[in-house]
Image (tube, helix red, strand yellow):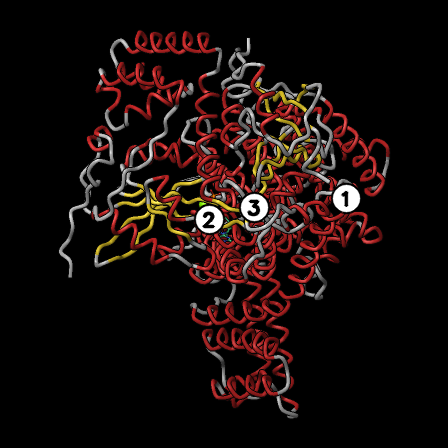
Amino acid sequence: MKSEPAFSHSAGRSPESARTGRTSRKRPLVVLAGQQNGGKSTLFNTLTGASQHIANYPGVTVDKKSGSYRHHQIRIDVVDLPGTYSLTSFSLEERVARDFIFTSHPDVVVNVVDAAGLKRSLLLTLQLLEAGFPMIMALNMIDVAHRRGLSIDVNRLEDRLGIRVIPTIGRKRQGKNALKKAIWQTTTGELEHQQFQMVYEKAEPLLARVEQELSRHPEITTGYPVRWMAVRLMEEDDQIEKRICELSKNGHLLLSELMSAKTAFETDQSLNISDYLASCREKTAARITRECVTKTRADRPTLTEKIDRVVLNRLLAPLFLLATVYLIYDLSIVRGYQLTQYTWPLLATLRNMVAGLLPDAGLLLDPYLRALSLWIIDSTLTLLNYIPIFFILFGLIAILEDSGYMARIAFIMDKLFYNYGLHGQSTLPFILGGVFAGGCAVPGVMAARAIPDERARMATILTVPFMNCMAKIPLYTLIVNIYFANYKSWAMLFISTITIIVALFAAKLLTTTVIRQMTTTPFVMALPAYHLPTVGAVLTRALERVWLYVKKVGTIVVVVAVIIFVLLQWPGINKQQMAGYQQQMQQATDTFCKMIETADPHLGRFTDSQLLDLLNDYDDYKRALFASGGGKGKRDVDRKFQSRNELFFSILKPEKDETARKISRALKKLHSKRKRLRREIKEARIVNSFLGMTGKILEPVSRFAGFDWKINVALLSSFAARESSVATLGVLFREGADANLTLEQRMDNEGRSTGFSSLNALALLLFFALYPPCLATAIMVKVQTQSYKWMLFSIIFPTVLGLIAAGLVYSIGSYLNATGIQMMGIFYGVALTTTILFGFIKTGNKLKKEKIE
Amino acid sequence: MQISFFKQRKPMKNARKQSHMRPSHHRKFCRLNDLKPGCCGRIRHHHSSGAIRRRLLDLGLVPETTVVVVCAAPLNDPLLLKLENDQIALRRREAALIEVETLFDDSVS
Ligand SMILES: Nc1nc2c(ncn2[C@@H]2O[C@H](COP(=O)(O)OP(=O)(O)OP(=O)(O)O)[C@@H](O)[C@H]2O)c(=O)[nH]1
Ligand SMILES: [Mg+2]
């Protein structure tokens, strides 16, 4: 067994400066660096067993992620970095990667390289070598290279670069052990190499001069190799420029001196130095590639190119795209919904089990523990009910990402999105948010991170919540079924497309006003080669995203459910009112007891608690029967209740005996009286609650959009979680609930008497579609934008927009005396035309670091 | 003013060196944006600056390399370029900032 080795850079490789900045560290540190989509995260997962997000889409990893593994009894830390095309500081991911490398001073840099695109990858490799850290190359995707008829001479590549080169196939975990061994040998200093250093021919004299000047200022160069810094400086790297100005007393002087040397050199040689440096690297990369890669067969179109000829064909591309989106919609939303019919009973059983463990219900008022727990469980279960849909949806999206088609969607859609200030890469956030119907804004907002363009990213984050998330669907269905029953498909089409139209409109509105000043970056994207998605990867990804959703439900929704519960309960009804209800209940119980006494004197008088038990048993029994599924299940339930309490059971399920039946009938009557009273109390409480009062206060304003206080309460509570809107409406529109009418019928009946027309319904529908993001999404907006200001904005902006839209539709509709469906058509036409016209307006672009040459 | 990196003569010399290309008698320059799908051009220099220029260079769109315009997206905007083994999507706006020398189309049948 080896004793613990000292981890140090092997002699002769690392420049002095790199070593001086190194912090003392017990465990060796390995970083994975490389270009986008090279398979860094795949290798990271292979090494550490983590499950970092992987996709066949450039720029998936946007932040560093660390993990570790054990080798020879030593724990080795591994950090997965975002993919970068170079080590400059122009984009966020480049800054993240570069800053990490230079502040942490890794013991090994594993350069993950796409073997099928070796030349391009080498451009970064050459820059990494300049950074001077001990390096290993993981020649990944060697399988793809072989498929394309490329044979790579690994030994020669090692020789040219002066570093170990390990061929790997990340997806099949091949090369894992060789890579671990090479990492180990590098950390212990067993491997000695003379790492290759770039020579920039003509520019060498200039670089030498810059290096010389810089090395006179150790305060600037600590932690960075001087050579690397000189090259970056000549490439107009403003972070280095800033560093010089900030860290050195007369930094400005030094900088202007170096810059004039640079300009003098450029005029003298009549070349652009930063282009020249890039092209030197390009030539070196090309030379190395030429020397190490041989084509085993003549050039012929790759499979990816062949597929793209069809998939990106001008006429076929839109068809493929539409078919894809339709397939996603059909498989996840339609089929997924059918699946929920099987999963719901399971959740219902769970609810009943928990309900059984809680303190029993009171006669009129339940113990708070019971009421609150059930409230939380119900809120959670409605959300969990969507799991099958999400699982399918996320699985399909994983397939899209893994195959490489997602990048093509971005390519196809870029023009359209660009006209509205968005970006080709806004596609994924929108799809996750629910383009047509069914999605969730939380993963949508999260996915917006990958958009490199700052302004488009912000516009995407702020408009994703307009999409139709799962939680909006129940209310849509409810309203469409009541008020637009004859035009169901039209109404659904309206809902699913109007949100996109409005989102584009809003994005344009924002990019021309509020966020106009933000910087934009162009759409430049390397389209990845198509890969066949693997079942394992797709399943894990789907599970991960579902888990994320469950976690959201488990935390935020529970907290919010509690808050809403409180807001709906307090201050509640006063003592007198309560006393009135209690008196009514007392009368009912008295009648029942008297009736029993006359019918069957042997039974004696029930005590209050016995009576309560009986009533609760009645509830339980009915519920159990409902869940039993008939037949044998029913008999099991009977047996259970019989053994629990023989006497009660004889009342719950009377035999032929006439008196028992009479008693049973009386119990039923008492039971429904109790149910009615309880509901009345509940409603009275909501009316007198904080939320109810707020709803009433808002009525004068909301009347412009045709909302009464009940709708206001529902909308307010839906901010917590959209699902609650339907639940709250269910409580508020309670008339007829006893007659077993559905909520649809109840709302319809009540609507007729209060004049809630299809026009009101349309206004409500519109407002709900544009309504601010739910709390979970708002929090995600905060996380992504790092600012409470934007979070607040993301709540206020849609509210105002929604109120204006709903108000206009309602007022104009009332003025014209139009029906809901007529107004729906008018609004659609107007919105569509405005948005299309809006798309033609040009937005000024403030490109990042525009310099006049 | 844009400083041209390569002197005018150079591309010419190179063109002759690469024997598989048919010799061009009159050299034509245009912007990458103006190339028809299926056409091919050699990059002369970039008129862009800052981040875009950097990114283009990083992706290998370095002066002297040959690019093929594979196709345009359905809405005519981003262009799909082929560069060695890579496919790169680029908006016309940015393509208009790249000056190329048109070459006879010899890589696309
Ligand atoms: N055929 C093949 N595919 C691979 C290999 N390694 C990774 N992939 C796939 O390549 C794609 C990109 O992998 P990632 O690990 O996400 O790449 P990354 O370097 O982390 O990308 P960014 O985070 O975007 O910089 C995924 O679809 C992987 O499944 C390999 O060796 N062979
Ligand atoms: Mg990654």
Q: Residues within 10 Å of mark 1 (few under 14, many from 20)?
A: some
Nearer the observer, disc 3 or disc 1?
1
The reply to whether the C-beta atoms of the residues labelled 2 and 3 are less than 8 Å apart is: no
Residue A839 image position (x, y, % from top left): 72, 27
A189 relative to A844 in the view: left or right: left
Total tally of numbered discs in the picture: 3
Residue A73 image position (x, y, % from top left): 21, 59
Q: Residues within 10 Å of mark 3 (few under 14, many from 20)?
A: many
Would residue A267 be visible to someone looking at this image?
A: yes
Q: Identify the subunit bearing mark 2.
A: A
Quadrant position of residue A428: top right
Q: Which residue is mark 2?
A: A152
- Amino acid at the residue labelled 3: Ser
Q: Which residue is mark 1?
A: A494
Quadrant position of residue A11: top left
Q: Which residue is mark 3?
A: A717
Q: CA distance from mark 2 to mark 1?
A: 56 Å
